[in-house]
Amino acid sequence: MADPSSYRPKPGQIPDSPGVYKFRDEHRRVIYVGKAKSLRQRLASYFQDLAGLHPRTRTMVTTAASVEWTVVSTEVEALQLEYSWIKEFDPRFNVKYRDDKSYPYLAVTMNEEFPRVQVMRGHKRKGVRYFGPYGHAWAIRDTVDLLLRVFPVRTCSAGVFKNASRTGRPCLLGYIGKCSAPCVGRVSAEEHRELAEEFCDFMAGRTGTYIRRLEQQMTDAAEEMEYERAARLRDDIEALKKAMEKNAVVLADATDADLMAVAEDELEAAVQIFHVRGGRVRGQRGWVTDKVEAVTTGDLVEHALQQLYGEETGDSVPKEVLVPALPDPVEPVQEWLTERRGSNVSLRIPQRGDKKALMETVQRNALQALGLHKTKRASDLTTRSRALEEIAGALDLDSAPLRIECYDISHLLGDDVVASMVVFEDGLQRKSEYRRFQIKGFEGQDDVRSMHEVITRRFRRYLAEKERTGEWTNGENASGDGAPRDGVSADGTSTEGAPLGNAALEGDTTGNAFAGNAFTEEDGRPKRFAYPPQLVVVDGGQPQVAAAKRALDELGIDDIAVCGLAKRLEEVWLPHEDDPVVLPRTSEGLYLLQRVRDEAHRFAITYQRTKRAKRFKASPLDEVPGLGETRKQALIKHFGSVKKLRSATIDQICEVPGIGRKTAEAVAVALAQAAPAAPAVNTATGEIMEDEEVGASGTTTGSPEEPVTAGASHERRGQET
């Protein structure tokens, strides 16, 4: 626990201007981000007598070890920068709304030649019309099912659409009249787009004119004694009215507004939002947050507005936002919303009439959401706490292991040996901390050596981070001997796993694995292996546990507990113990360890299969330096197959446009060194394919429904570990 006076800025050092400030802990992690109209006045409030601070604010300032700030020109800029930093650093003491689900939207892909109606989640895409969000996907499908008989717009996927175009036969919806079947030319692209636009107009609230037009057409058909057509129009009108009944008018004058309500207690708060478009409730969503700082209802509203509209622009931000309390000050927030929309936005508290009545409904939903969340969380927190306490008791730990790391080794008959590291914090998955490794210290199958290598590499990186950030004093390493540690220099080039999606997963050879890459003062974001766990779990028994413990001992780390969970009898093994610890089958601690172990196994298997798939798809031409995909395709197109290319002379290879003599020689050498692939089999007919039918990637082209990898052995899942 730090003393705030130890890092309090000097008098007069803090500017008296708008800005954004960051509190960091001793590991340089950003733990709180805030904004202020006057940085001097706001920061001074944190360094008063601790007894006068709110308990959660007191916890924050005693956890912090430093504070820094950035000056901006206006309060609107401060609001924008605060939102960006909260999203980037994910500070633990900021209000963070936990969305209880991913809300579905009804989307119309107007950016396609034949627009499609479908359910979409996630980020919005350009050129797509969105309606919602809805509480449930089935609510969207019910609405769409009613409207398709009137607006028979395409709902099929691209694959189904192409298959119907190829065969000349529409899908079932085309036969029953719920799709205009543009795939087989029943309507033109222009006619289908007009249908999609009418569908969007109806969903946007312009319903009255369309229904009146249908009623007039029904009357005209009846007068002309076209009774079947009149009956069909009558059914269409009924379907539209039934769809409209699902969204009754709640606000007059086709109002576009979002209504927000907050239900809170001392520890938590729930936010509910109703999206009203065209006077009808088009969607509803809700969030829950822990009140980890002293916040007012206005502050909660401000944070909710940031999360709700931080990524939105244009019409996605309504003209009117109704809230239970206004942020203080309100002007910067209202100006920020206006900038997001591009026109004036009204942010106010409803006082009377229909809007106040609807706000009361939203408030009741917020109260119910908070009550339901508390019921669920009480059970969840109790279970997780009991599990961690049981683990601590069984393993004789000083405290509950709040951070658990689990490691697993995976391979297929000794090939493509990889390892995984998964992280659980407070009994919950922390997927952003997952890492994966390639075993490169040796060839072949040896789970014990692999485990020793992975643990060594992971904790070398941790020690390197401690050394680089100055957590070791007087140049001492973890064992206190002051000697330099093997493999932890700032120019290390090890291949430890990087965050998912990073190219460094396949091996970091930049020479900057530690220096300013994993944990820099500029951003403060934790990456790679910056923090130690309280417990290391390995998938395996006594040998794997001994290997992990030996790796930690060699690095001089003695404050991290190690255990293993063997699959056969679900026994927990400890270092230097001849007998395992047997937890009851009903134990919450055993269940948590099983979840951690199974997640590590799943993550390792996924990575191993990915690497194996890449290897099976490899081509001899991949080994030719400087030969890109375009020139590989040119070679195959010129010769017709890899077999004919292999038998070609260097002069003949040089005849291919773009292939010089040096490249031709490299191609000839690579093909000569590569063993000929085993014959591929067309699984549709059972016949052996000639090389002319096999492409450069090694996959057959004779069976488009099920391509077969040439030379690939049959996979046996039971041999995968």
Image (spheres, rainbow, N blue to C red):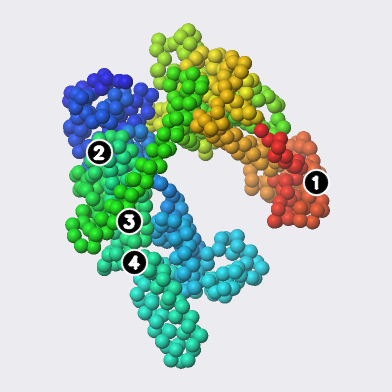
Q: Which residue is mark 2?
A: 295
Left/right of residue 241 with respect to residue 15 in the rendered view? right
Q: CA distance from mark 4 to mark 3?
A: 13 Å
In the foreground, 263 or 205: 263
Query: Which mark is in front, 1 or 4?
Result: 4
Quadrant for the N terminus, please. Answer: top left
**N-terminal label among 1 and 4:** 4
The answer to whether marks 3 and 2 mark residues whose Cβ atoms lie closer than 8 Å is no
**N-terminal label among 4 and 2:** 4
Secondary structure, mark 4, is loop
Quadrant for the C terminus, please. Answer: top right
Query: Which mark is in front, 2 or 1?
Result: 2
Q: Residue at x 22, y 48 (%)?
A: 325
The answer to whether marks 2 and 1 mark residues whose Cβ atoms lie closer than 8 Å is no
- In which quadrant of the rendered view does residue 386 lie? top left
Q: Which residue is mark 3?
A: 274
Kind of residue indicated by mark 2:
Val
Kind of residue indicated by mark 1:
Pro
Secondary structure, mark 1, is loop
Q: CA distance from mark 2 to mark 1?
A: 69 Å
Secondary structure, mark 2, is loop
**Circle 2 Cα neighbour tier, 10 Å, few/some/many (<14 / 14–19 / ≥20):** some
- In which quadrant of the rendered view does residue 703 lie? bottom right
Q: Residue at x 56, y 31 (%)?
A: 585
Q: CA distance from mark 4 to mark 2?
A: 36 Å
Kind of residue indicated by mark 4:
Ala
